Image: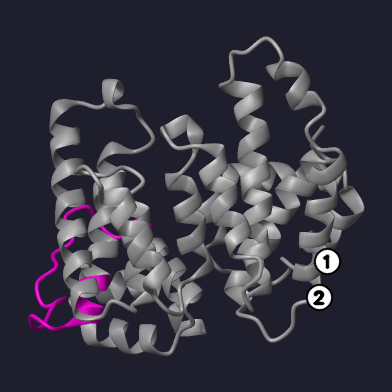
């Protein structure tokens, strides 16, 4: 929808037009709403006032919006820096916003445990939990929710990455547990998991066989699984365009790594004309690099 442009959302949030923003979110798909909140959070001022966002103690959508934007603002205070590279003031602000976001989203989920949008954002903030057991609670809430955006399941995989203290077994358990569901685009979780597994071999695994395992990774059963996921996603009909683009984006990356450029190009062609926020979930530079590679510009 044209009105769900990032600049509209930022303007409404900055001027306190929360009802207008809520009305637009009501009309959106779950993934579209998730991406729009991400874009608003990336563009709003760090001094954004949340006065009036939550109208009452049972304002589920207001609590969800507040939680999502508080997380985004807090993350911007810290940026991509590690804890050692973050000043004490920056970290205090980051942590304060993260706690506020957590509290708002927990309130929203306590009021409506099936709120897929709130569960997806709560899973995101739980990739860097502020208390013990938060990841496990967030996973349970996500799996209990309904109409969860695809990004929510991506966040669940992210929370279980081995490089951040999780395990590859848990990551693939989660990804494969979604494949039997009536949600074909969730096959992109397999692409995400394989990309992260190979990257772990390449960048984090210090075992003597890691380099060889990385070199030979995209073969055999792995390649078969990616090809199957690709076909299921390409054949999906009547799906949310925002989810389709996020799924296609991860397939582009995984298939390019695997040398399956013809399949990757089929997913790339479906990106044309879409102005959503899939790049926020993947990283603009990362996705752009793979698009250039497929176009023969990047080597």
Q: Quadrant of residue 86?
A: top left
Rendered image: mark on residue 235: 2
Please indicate, yes or no, whether residue 15 appears anywhere in the rendered image.
no
* Number of residues whose C-alpha sits closer than 10 Å to that of mark 2, classed few (under 14), some (14–19) or many (20 or more): few
Horizontally, residue 255 falls left or right of residue 141, namely: right
Q: Main secondary structure of the magenta part?
A: loop
Residue 295 among those drawn in magenta: no
Disc 2 element: loop
Horizontally, residue 135 falls left or right of residue 53, namely: right
Residue at the image point whose x is 81% and y is 75% from the top: 235
* Number of residues whose C-alpha sits closer than 10 Å to that of mark 1, classed few (under 14), some (14–19) or many (20 or more): few
Front residue (pair 143, 250): 143
In three-dimensional space, the C-alpha distance between marks 2 and 1, rounded to whole angstroms, equals 6 Å
Rendered image: mark on residue 231: 1
Horizontally, residue 226 falls left or right of residue 117, namely: right
Please indicate, yes or no, whether residue 208 appears anywhere in the rendered image.
yes
Front residue (pair 279, 202): 202
The tally of labels here is 2
Instruction: Tell me: residue 297, above or below residue 277.
Output: above
Residue at the image point whose x is 13% and y is 64% from the top: 49
Q: Which residues are magenta?
A: 41-64
User: Residue 74: where, in percent of width, then height?
Assistant: 24, 48
User: Residue 281: where, in percent of width, then height?
Assistant: 51, 54
Residue at the image point whose x is 19% and y is 44% from the top: 131
Image quadrant holding the C terminus, namely top right
Rendered image: mark on residue 105: none
């Amino acid at each position: 929808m044209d009105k769900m442009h990032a600049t509209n959302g930022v303007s409404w949030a900055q001027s306190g037009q929360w009802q207008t923003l809520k009305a637009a979110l009501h009309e959106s798909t779950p993934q579209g709403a998730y991406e729009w909140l991400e874009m608003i959070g990336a563009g709003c001022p760090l001094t954004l006032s949340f006065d009036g966002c939550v109208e009452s103690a049972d304002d589920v959508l207001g609590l969800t919006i507040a939680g999502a934007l508080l997380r985004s603002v807090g993350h911007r205070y810290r940026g991509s820096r590690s804890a050692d590279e973050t000043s004490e003031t920056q970290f205090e602000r980051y942590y304060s916003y993260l706690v506020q976001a957590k509290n708002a989203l927990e309130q929203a989920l306590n009021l409506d445990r099936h709120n897929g949008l709130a569960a997806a954002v709560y899973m995101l903030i739980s990739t860097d939990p502020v208390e013990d057991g938060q990841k496990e609670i967030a996973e349970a809430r996500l799996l209990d929710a309904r109409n969860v955006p695809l990004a929510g399941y991506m966040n669940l995989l992210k929370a279980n990455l081995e490089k951040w203290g999780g395990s590859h077994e848990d990551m693939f358990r989660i990804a494969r547990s979604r494949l039997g569901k009536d949600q074909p685009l969730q096959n992109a979780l397999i692409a995400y998991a394989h990309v992260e597994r190979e990257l772990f071999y390449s960048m984090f695994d210090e075992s003597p066989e890691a380099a060889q395992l990385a070199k030979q990774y995209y073969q055999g059963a792995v390649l078969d699984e990616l090809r199957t996921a690709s076909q299921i996603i390409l054949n999906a009909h009547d799906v949310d365009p925002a989810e389709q683009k996020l799924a296609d984006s991860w397939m582009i990356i995984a298939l390019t790594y695997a040398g399956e450029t013809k399949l990757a190009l089929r997913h790339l062609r479906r990106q044309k004309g879409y102005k959503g926020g899939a790049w926020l979930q993947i990283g603009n530079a990362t996705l752009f690099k793979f698009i250039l590679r497929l176009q023969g510009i990047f080597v």
